[in-house]
Amino acid sequence: MTEVSVERLRYRLLSGPDDRTFCERVSAALAEGYELYGSPSITSVDGRVVVAQAVLLPEGTP
């Protein structure tokens, strides 16, 4: 089996419905070494709450 190397993006914007799945995605990014960047954003689209959070991989992180 060949190992595939995937380069992680330094900046990611996570967005989606304000639910447990979104929180799990943010938590997973933090566990991978990302840090929160800025404040979260929240809006309503067609009556549904949508949130966004930017995360940043610190320089020098492999």
Image: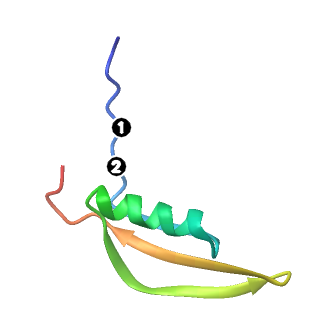
Q: Residue at x 63, y 76 (%)?
A: 18
Q: Nearer the viewer, residue 47 or 10?
A: 47
Q: Residue at x 39, y 58 (%)?
A: 28
Tell me the amino acid under the disc marked 1.
Answer: Val
Residue under label 1 = 6
Q: Position of residue 38 (x, y in %)?
A: 38, 85
In the picture as drawn, the residue positioned furthest to the left comes out as: 60
Residue 42 — which label?
none
Q: Is residue 40 above or below residue 21?
A: below
| C-alpha span from label 2 to label 1 | 6 Å
Tell me the amino acid under the disc marked 2.
Answer: Arg
User: Does residue 45 appear left or right of residue 62 in this picture?
Assistant: right
Q: Residue at x 75, y 86 (%)?
A: 44
Q: Is residue 3 above or below residue 58?
A: above
Q: Kindly check if marks 2 and 1 are in contact, taking CB atoms under 8 A apart as contact.
A: yes
Q: Helix, strand or loop at disc 2?
A: loop
Q: Position of residue 52 (x, y in %)?
A: 55, 77
Q: Position of residue 8 (x, y in %)?
A: 34, 49
